[in-house]
């Protein structure tokens, strides 16, 4: 059921994007559009705006439905259910290289440093 609602949700999202891109800009937010009310074609705009509202309402309903379904599934399980508390130690075999000891990881001491820098010949 969740997959069906998700597919409907994606189709509604694509339809909503398409219908918004089909509408004519009337805002004039960038200094264009607008004009007079004589040649605006309000009949086509109201049909597109009603269709936009229909797609938007369907999109919101499917969003809320998917959220409720996801929350219902999350209530029955926990993230910690999949975490193992046991540490697994692999068996030692001859093909696995040994890890270096802690002393090998330290930087060299001052006694290992050369007395003089090498010559630049």
Image (cartoon, helix red, strand yellow):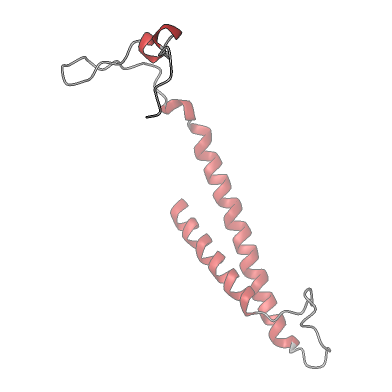
Q: Is residue 98 something one can see in this rendering?
A: yes
What residue lies at 68% left-to-right and 75% top-to-bottom? 50
Q: Quadrant of residue 25?
A: bottom right
Along the viewing direction, whichever of 17 and 90 lies nearer the viewer: 90
Count of picture labels: 0
Relative to 54, is 37 above or below? below
Relative to 100, is 12 above or below? below
Along the viewing direction, whichever of 120 and 67 lies nearer the viewer: 120
What residue lies at 64% left-to-right and 69% top-to-bottom? 54
Left or right: 84 as drawn, with respect to 43: left
What residue lies at 47% left-to-right and 26% top-to-bottom? 80
Q: Is residue 1 something one can see in this rendering?
A: no
Q: Report the residue that reaches farthest toward the bottom.
A: 38
Left or right: 91 as drawn, with respect to 83: left
Relative to 93, is 23 above or below? below
Q: Report the residue that reaches farthest toward the left.
A: 94
Along the viewing direction, whichever of 2 and 32 lies nearer the viewer: 32
Left or right: 16 as drawn, with respect to 34: left
For the C terminus, the image quarter is: top left
Q: Position of residue 14 (x, y in %)?
A: 54, 68
Q: Report the residue that reaches farthest toward the top.
A: 111
Q: Position of residue 120 (x, y in %)?
A: 40, 28
Q: Quadrant of residue 93?
A: top left
Left or right: 112 as drawn, with respect to 67: left
Q: Position of residue 5 (x, y in %)?
A: 49, 57
């Amino acid at each position: 059921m969740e997959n069906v609602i998700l597919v409907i949700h994606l189709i509604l999202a694509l339809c909503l994007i398409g219908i918004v891109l089909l509408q004519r800009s009337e805002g004039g937010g960038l200094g264009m559009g607008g004009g007079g009310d004589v040649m605006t074609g309000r009949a086509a705009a109201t049909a597109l705006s009603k269709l936009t509202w229909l797609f938007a309402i369907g999109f919101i309903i499917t969003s809320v439905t998917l959220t409720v379904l996801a929350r219902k599934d999350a209530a029955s399980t926990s993230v910690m259910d999949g975490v193992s508390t046991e540490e697994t130690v692999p068996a030692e075999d001859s093909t696995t290289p040994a890890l270096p000891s802690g002393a090998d990881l330290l930087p060299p001491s001052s006694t290992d440093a050369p007395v003089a820098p090498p010559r630049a010949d």
